[in-house]
Image (cartoon, helix red, strand yellow):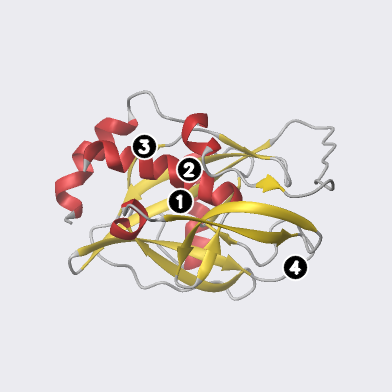
């Protein structure tokens, strides 16, 4: 698979109506048993952006994900796309590129932004996230921020779109909530929840053009 060959098609597809909730719903985790998480947010979701950063490595197109460090928060230790909340004056694209620079050490000026996926509300942390799809001409030298990032994982588009890419298993969320979680397995890690739902929309778009 060649990034140069699909970039124009991907950019055009991102400008058209997106699958959105139809793709998200297929990867939504379902509570098991009677106990389910409850969230009572009093404020509207805060804006933010995450980055799907595509680059060519040999015959494969890849993009990085991060495993977050353990901390007192809703997404401790989880696998996510690089990104975070928007700072004052930033839009989602600016936020995603800045967070990519801060978390994995890319130069925020280098990616070529192709477009965005559907906005996605991450209920546990009360964020409205916009996934930003961008490309790099060359594979970057990644420099993970040790404070936020435990390690960087790398997913190939071939693995994302293969027929058996979506798996399912029961997990324990937050140490106490049993969930049946559709997920992607990437480098031995379970990618579930909001990240998996956003990636499934990206997967659906890729299957439209490849």
Horizontal side of 83 relative to 162 (left or right) equals: right
Q: Are marks 2 and 1 in contact (CB under 8 Å)?
A: yes
- Figure check: 121 above or below 182: above
- The quarter of the picture where residue 67 lies is bottom right
* Residue identifier under label 2: 131
* Residue identifier under label 4: 71
Horizontal side of 209 relative to 22 (left or right) equals: left
Q: Position of residue 113 (x, y in %)?
A: 34, 43
Q: CA distance from mark 2 to mark 1?
A: 6 Å
Of mark 4 and mark 2, the one earlier in the sequence is 4
Local packing at callout 3 (Cα closer than 10 Å; few below 14, some 14-19, many 20+) is some
Of mark 3 and mark 4, the one earlier in the sequence is 4
Depth check, front residue: 29 or 81: 29
* Residue identifier under label 1: 51
Which residue lies at the image location 18% right of the left edge and 56% below the top edge?
1
Q: CA distance from mark 4 to mark 1?
A: 22 Å
Q: Is residue 126 visible?
A: yes
* Residue identifier under label 3: 115
Q: Are marks 4 and 1 in contact (CB under 8 Å)?
A: no
Horizontal side of 124 relative to 131 (left or right) equals: right
The disc placed on residue 153 is none
């Amino acid at each position: 698979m060649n990034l140069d060959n699909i970039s124009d098609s991907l950019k055009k597809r991102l400008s058209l109506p997106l699958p959105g909730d139809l793709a998200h719903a297929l990867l939504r985790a379902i509570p098991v048993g009677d106990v389910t998480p409850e969230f009572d947010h009093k404020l509207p979701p805060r804006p933010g952006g995450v980055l799907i950063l595509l680059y060519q490595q040999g015959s494969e197109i890849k993009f990085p994900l991060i495993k977050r460090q353990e901390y007192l928060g809703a997404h401790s230790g989880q696998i996510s796309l690089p990104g975070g909340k928007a700072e004052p004056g930033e839009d989602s694209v600016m936020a995603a590129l800045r967070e990519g620079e801060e978390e994995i050490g890319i130069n925020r000026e280098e990616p070529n932004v192709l477009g965005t996926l559907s906005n996605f509300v991450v209920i546990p942390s009360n964020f409205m996230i916009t996934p930003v799809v961008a490309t790099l001409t060359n594979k970057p030298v990644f420099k993970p921020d040790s404070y936020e990032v435990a390690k960087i994982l790398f997913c190939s588009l071939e693995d994302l779109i293969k027929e058996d890419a979506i798996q399912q298993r029961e997990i324990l969320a937050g140490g106490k909530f049993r969930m049946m979680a559709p997920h992607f397995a990437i480098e031995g890690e379970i990618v579930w929840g909001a990240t998996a739902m956003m990636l499934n929309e990206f997967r659906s778009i890729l299957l439209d053009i490849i």
